[in-house]
Amino acid sequence: MTQPFDIPQPETLGKVAVLFGGSSAEREVSLMSGQGVLQALQERGVDAHAFDPRAQPLQQLKEEGFQRCFIALHGRYGEDGTLQGALELLGIPYTGSGVLASSLGMDKLMTKRLWREAGIPTPNWSQVSSAAEAESAFDQLGSPMIVKPSREGSTLGLTKVMRREDCASAYAKAAAMDPLVLCEQFISGDEVTQPILGQGDLAQTLPMIRVVAPDGNYDYHNKYFGDETQYLIPSGLADAQEATISAWVLKAYRVLGARGWGRIDVMIDRQSQLPYLLEINTSPGMTSHSLVPMSAKHAGLSYPDLCLWLLGQARLDYVKGQV
């Protein structure tokens, strides 16, 4: 963290809705994130209330006089620009990226296209629409190959394919969650992740985390429920290498027009030691296992202060300045 963060006074934040739960495949994780955020804000004296968009119509936010929303939703209908668009129409400022950046960041294919156009290193890929096309991608990209839905998170629907004959089942698994399926070159090496706070030229990275999962399998269970994954802060990388990755991460965040906060996942090729950026999370987790609060804590920013700062950054795309 290169500059201090001004933490707003709770009484200046007004009536706040913490949006969590929702209808995506990541509902379970969102419930954990939202409960943590809600408790932290309430303990700091914020007039914060739980709001589950799956159970309550969004128009209720306006009718009940909410002045800000903390988005603790993950995946579709929360992280993909749809909710952000609804809040724009309601005129209620919200945390995190706006409509376009949220939509782009949720779509791994669009993210990779923009990053590649900007010269940002990302693994080679192919968009496929059938099992046969997945097999052709396997011939092109090599083994292992990652097959995953383009617009899901938390490794849901993801398969690491080692053999050509497994492409069909991997494609079916991904396509069951999203018609847009991504086949991606597998990068073998260290996995790191880095949170970013802020917007534009003022955006800055938080400490990098190196993720060491059991057998290299950082799946849904190991992300959110297991205690076997190691999170190394400091990362243990050489200073020069970490600085290079952080520069790419900041550029990638800015290219997408992200704001508020985010987290970018990176693989470091074992042979070349070159970084490859995988994807961005524009509404990261806030659970007990989540990486943004872990990194922020290492930088001296507590979980409640992180929540307050993010809430103070609530914005609308089409209203200038801070609320």
Image (tube, rainbow, N blue to C red):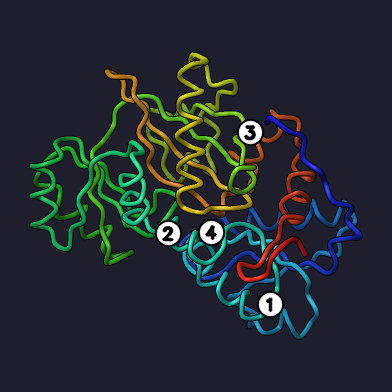
Q: Which residue is mark 4?
A: 74
Q: In the rendered view, does 313 fall on the left or right side of 161?
A: right
- Can you tell which of label 4 and label 2 is closer to the viewer? 2
At mark 2, the secondary structure is helix
Nearer-N-terminus badge (1/3): 1
Q: What residue is rendered at 53% in x and 59% in y?
A: 74
- What label does residue 91 carry, if any? 1
In which quarter of the view is residue 106 placed?
Answer: bottom left
Measured Cα–Cα span from mark 1 to mark 2: 22 Å
Rendered location of residue 125, percent (x, y): 23, 46
Q: Nearer the viewer, residue 49 or 66?
A: 66
The residue under label 2 is which amino acid type? Leu
Q: Which residue is mark 2?
A: 104
Say above or below: 239 vs 74. Answer: above
Say above or below: 97 vs 279. Answer: below
Measured Cα–Cα span from mark 4 to mark 2: 14 Å
- What label does residue 103 carry, if any? none
Q: In the rendered view, does 27 fall on the left or right side of 298?
A: left
- Can you tell which of label 2 and label 3 is closer to the viewer? 2
Nearer-N-terminus badge (4/1): 4
Q: Which residue is mark 3?
A: 295
Nearer-N-terminus badge (4/2): 4
In which quarter of the view is residue 69 placed?
Answer: bottom right
- Can you tell which of label 4 and label 1 is closer to the viewer? 1
Rendered location of residue 117, percent (x, y): 31, 47
At mark 4, the secondary structure is loop
